[in-house]
Image (cartoon, grey):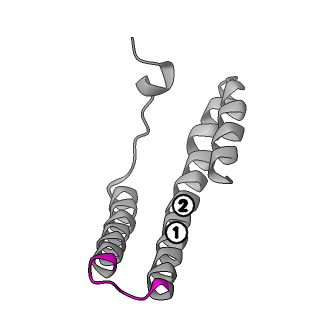
Amino acid sequence: MPCEHCLKKTERSDDEKRRLINRLSRLEGQIRGIRAMVENDAYCVDILTQSAAAKSAFNAFNRELLRRHVEGCVTRDIKAGDEETVGELMDIIGKLMR
């Protein structure tokens, strides 16, 4: 039986989906570029620089998704009396800050 979180869904507007998918597509491109750098024996510092840029892009993706989660899902759940969502939020923030 799936966990209760696996059953939850978040409806997103077409614009929000497009923005998130665009960010992920750019990340995919960055990762492919880093892989090519490794395959082509690029200088370590150059690879690390690109890796730092990819990490920054991933952090930006997470910030946008987290903002939407707090403004939508968390706010909705608290208004409905589901305070467990606060614990869930704190858990995911802890994971993102590692």
Counting from the top left corner in percent of width and height, residue 23 is at 39, 67
Instruction: Using the image, determine if residue 69 lies above or below residue 40.
Output: above
State the quadrant of the N terminus. Answer: top left
Counting from the top left corner in percent of width and height, residue 3 is at 47, 19
- Report which quarter residue 97 is drawn in: bottom right
Span highlighted in magenta in the image: 38-44
Is 63 within the magenta? no
Instruction: Using the image, determine if residue 91 lies above or below residue 3.
Output: below
| Residue at horizontal 42 percent and vertical 33 percent from the top | 9
Q: Secondary structure at mark 1?
A: helix
Q: Which residue is mark 1?
A: 55
Q: Of circles 2 and 1, which is in front?
A: 1
- Report which quarter residue 78 is drawn in: top right
Pointer 2 or 1: first along the chain: 1
Q: Amino acid at mark 2?
A: Glu
Q: Number of marks in the image?
A: 2
Which residue is farthest front? Answer: 41
Q: Secondary structure at mark 2?
A: helix
Label 2: few (<14), some (14–19) or many (≥20) C-alpha neighbours in 10 Å: some
Counting from the top left corner in percent of width and height, residue 18 is at 33, 62
| Residue at horizontal 61 percent and vertical 49 percent from the top | 71
Label 1: few (<14), some (14–19) or many (≥20) C-alpha neighbours in 10 Å: some
Instruction: Give the camera-side residue of 78 and 48.
Output: 48
- Report which quarter residue 73 is drawn in: top right
Instruction: Give the camera-side residue of 38 and 65.
Output: 38
Instruction: Give the camera-side residue of 53 and 43.
Output: 43
Q: Which mark is residue 64?
A: 2
| Residue at horizontal 32 percent and vertical 56 percent from the top | 14
Q: Amino acid at mark 1?
A: Lys
